[in-house]
Every structure is written in C-alpha cells, then in structure tokens.
C-alpha cells in the first residue's frame, strides 16, 4: 500500500479540523526507508496545526491542483509532525524522488526570504499507513 501511494507524483492529503470537517491539500510524498511515507512543510502551516490536533489523515492520488484521480481509493494513516534530523531524512527522500523540482522550490523560498516573506521553521510529516 505504501509503495503504491508513494509512487504517485501528487497526493491529496486530507487532514481534519477540530470540528471533524476535512481539508484536502495536494502534497508531494516520498517513501521512507521504514515503510512509512512523508512530506515536508512549514512548521506554521495549517496542515501541521490540524495534524497536531488530530493525527488521522487520508491520502489519495491527485493532480497538482488537488483534483482526486477517478477510480482511486483513499489510504488512511496516522500522521506525526517531526523536526530536526527526521526532517533531513524526509527532505532527502523528497529530493531523491522529485530532483530538480525541489531545487527550484528551495530557490524560490530563499528568494522569498530576501524580500521579507520568510517561512517559519521547516518540519516534516511522517505517515504510518493503515494496513
């Protein structure tokens, strides 16, 4: 299951608000060495806040806009926001999968920081998929 969802270019991550309503966000995702999957994000992002409040998430293949692919199934899991060395592991997995696109995004982030729109600290989300 992790192999199938992690092979997708984009996945729709559904995380849940305190009231139980779902919010879907397209993310890049990569397989990790221990069978889990992960992605990087800003520590101050809304998805991090939602995951900190409720670790249950679902993943489903989608396009870059977040439109879910027809005929695909959701995969559930438990998400954990991580910092420090674990972020580096997830970054390496994302870079291995997405290559130059990551370098481009990192360059744009550095440019944003030069004009005073710096992001908060980096974090990653690691998801243990349901069996």
Image: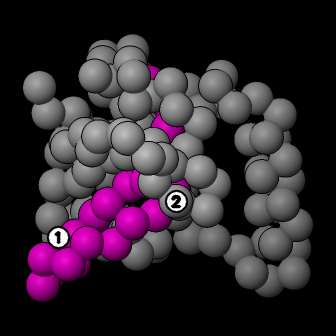
Vertical comparison of 81 with 92: above or below: below
The percent position of residue 57, horizontal first and vertical second, equals: 23, 54
The percent position of residue 58, horizontal first and vertical second, equals: 26, 50
Q: Quadrant of residue 23?
A: bottom left
Task: Sort mark 2 into few (<14), some (14-19) or many (20+) by Cα contacts within 10 Å.
Answer: some
Please state, as top left, top right, bottom left or bottom right, where the N terminus lies in the image: top left
Please state, as top left, top right, bottom left or bottom right, where the C terminus lies in the image: top left
Q: Which residue lies under the disc numbered 2?
A: 67
- Local secondary structure at mark 2: loop
The main secondary structure of the magenta stretch is strand
Residue stretch in magenta: 12-32
Vertical comparison of 44 with 84: above or below: below
User: Which mark lies nearer to you, 1 or 2?
Assistant: 2
Q: Which residue lies under the disc numbered 1?
A: 53
The percent position of residue 123, horizontal first and vertical second, equals: 46, 53
In the rendered structure, the answer to whether residue 73 lies left or right of residue 4 reads left
In the rendered structure, the answer to whether residue 108 lies left or right of residue 68 reads right
Q: Could you say which is closer to the camera, residue 98 or residue 109?
A: 98
Vertical comparison of 110 with 22: above or below: above
Q: Which residue appears farthest toward the front when viewing the image?
A: 71
- Local secondary structure at mark 1: helix
* Image label count: 2
Residue depicted at 36% across the width and 40% down the height: 72
The percent position of residue 85, horizontal first and vertical second, equals: 45, 35
Q: Could you say which is closer to the camera, residue 99 or residue 83?
A: 99
Task: Sort mark 1 into few (<14), some (14-19) or many (20+) by Cα contacts within 10 Å.
Answer: few
> Which mark is first along the chain, 2 or 1?
1
Q: Which disc number belongs to residue 113? A: none
């Amino acid at each position: 299951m992790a192999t199938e969802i992690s092979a997708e270019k984009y996945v729709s991550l559904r995380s849940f608000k305190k009231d139980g309503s779902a919010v879907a966000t397209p993310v890049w995702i990569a397989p990790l060495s221990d069978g889990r999957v992960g992605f990087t994000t800003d520590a101050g992002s809304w998805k991090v806040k939602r995951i900190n409040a409720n670790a249950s998430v679902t993943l489903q293949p989608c396009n870059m806009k977040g439109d879910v692919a027809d005929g695909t199934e959701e995969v559930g899991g438990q998400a954990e926001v991580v910092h420090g060395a674990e972020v580096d592991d997830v970054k390496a997995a994302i870079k291995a999968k997405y290559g130059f696109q990551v370098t481009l995004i990192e360059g744009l982030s550095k440019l944003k920081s030069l004009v005073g729109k710096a992001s908060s600290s980096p974090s990653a989300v690691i998801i243990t998929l349901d069996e």
